[in-house]
Structures are given as C-alpha cells and as structure tokens.
Image (cartoon, rainbow, N blue to C red):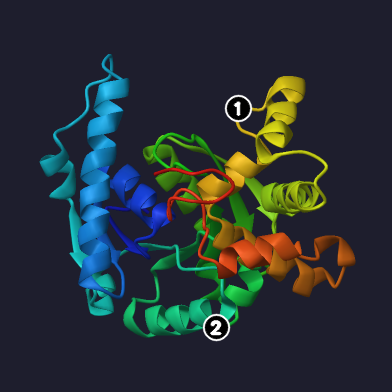
Amino acid sequence: MDIQVVGVVGAGVMGIGVAQNLAQTGHQVILVDIADRILEKAKQEIAQNIRFQGFFNKSEKIENPSEILSRIKFTTDYQFLESAEFIIENTTEKWDIKKEVYAQLDAICPQETIFAANTSAIPITRIASVTERSPKVIGIHFMNPVPIKSMVEIISGYHTSQETIETVKKVLTQMGKEGILVNDSPGFVSNRVLMLTINEAVFLLQDRVASASDVDRIFKGCFGHKMGPLETADLIGLDTILFSIEVLYESFNDSKYRPCPLLKKMVDAGLYGRKSGQGFYAYK
C-alpha cells in the first residue's frame, strides 16, 4: 500500500513535528485541530523550524518553507480526513479525549484507513476497542523533535495485522525513520522506563537531594546522556509527563508509578516546560 495522503490529528508539539516531517518527505498532509488560532501558530512554528533546520544543516539542501507548507492543509474540519489513507493521532494523553477522537475518525474514514496512535502510554488495544477496525490500529511512538529523531517505537495491539505493521514500516522508511516493533503494554518500552526516571528525578528535587541542574549534570556527565531527566521533562512537557505517569499508575496499580506531588503542583501552576516558557528551567 503506497501512502500519499496522511491525516495528522492534533497540532501540538508532536503533531507539528509529524506534519513537518511528512511534508518534507513528499506526503500530502491534512493537519486537524480544534481552533484556527492553534493551526495558525502551528503554521508559523513549522516555517520557523524549517528555517532553523536549514541554518544548522547548511550542507543539506532544505526546501523553501512555503513549498513544504503548501503540502499541508490546516483545518478544523475532521471531514477532510475522509481522503486520508493513513491517520497519525497526537491528541493529549487523556483517555476521555482520545476515545471521542477515535469514534469520530472511525465514522469518517474509509475502512481501509490505518489509525496510528502517537501515544506516550495508553495501550493500543484499548484504543482499537473503540473502533470497528482493530486490525488497522497500531501505535507509533515518535520522539521529540520528530524531524530530527530517527528512531521510533512501533506498538502492535492485540488485533493489529501484519499488513498494517508492514505499511507502517514503509511509511516510516519514507519519513527517514527506523521503527522497533514492541508488544502492547502501558508505556511500551521507552516511557515505562523514562517516566519512572523523570518522576524519581522530580522526587529528588522535592526532597532537596540536589538542584535540577545538578541532577541533570550527573546523568550527562556520568552516563553520557545528551539531556538530563529534568531537561527531558521540560522538552516533552510536564503536563504530558503527568498524564503518562498517571496512566501507568492506573494501569499497573503499582505504587512505584505514584506521581510526585511537586510534578502535580507544577502542572497545576501551568509550568509545563519549554512550551510554556517555564518548567524546571526558564526559557524566556
């Protein structure tokens, strides 16, 4: 199955990255979100990201931002997704929201359209259960920033077909990415480990064991990580971190996934990290 038209649901940090990556690799993209102001901001950020990419990779020929943007349709109307052969969903990590989105997609999209959930922790089998196309539902966990990160997790749900898996691998190859196939479990591999690490790092900060910068310096200096866990949390978004750790806590009923009270307080205060300008570090 040769995929040409891809629907991207959600124009947040991840949706913007996915849409940009797809458009840069020649796909026609339909980017959907709930408000025109969100889509206008997404358009500006994609153009800016492309310019930065060209600036930092002068040896690589980057298309003009206007040419790449011409391959993306920005809309609040889900009905346009009926022409998409492949959907990548990037909505917030709240089950009530995702459940409504998939019911809407299932009613609009042709039966052969594949649904790929770009989720941090919610099980793919649960997502598939609210559709009438379980064999065509799969997980793709992209890493941030999407256009730069070449590795992704592919998550096979209980009913996901081999044909769907092969189609996803083909699309990812077209996007310049390698996918590692894992079985369905809350948090999969990367976030089942990463969310625990970040949550424990926040506990270290709350308990005044070390400052945020010293926690991160230890991980970078001792283990060779490019970013420490608290810097990573700011990049991902503290709200997304909290939603993900809450899904793990609910799914496993294990106290080791108990969200740190400081993390909850920061999210309540609107300190989401880079996207809000303040998290464990200041960005304005």
Label 1 sits on residue: 226
Q: Which mark is residue 151?
A: none
Question: On the picture, is 234 further left or further right than 109?
Answer: right
Q: Quadrant of the C terminus?
A: top left
Residue 216: quadrant of the picture: top right
- Seen at 28% across and 31% down, the residue is 52
CA–CA distance between discs 2 and 1?
Answer: 35 Å
Q: Which of the two discs, 2 and 1, labels the residue nearer the N terminus?
A: 2
Residue closer to the observer: 97 or 105 = 97
Nearer the observer, disc 2 or disc 1?
1
Q: Position of residue 182 (x, y in %)?
A: 69, 50
Query: Mark 2 is on which residue type?
Result: Asp
Q: Residue at position x 69%, y 58% from top?
A: 187
In the depicted structure, whether residue 149 falls above or below residue 222: below
How far from the left and from the top, in percent, is residue 94? 56, 74
Location of residue 180 with respect to 140 vertically, above or below = above
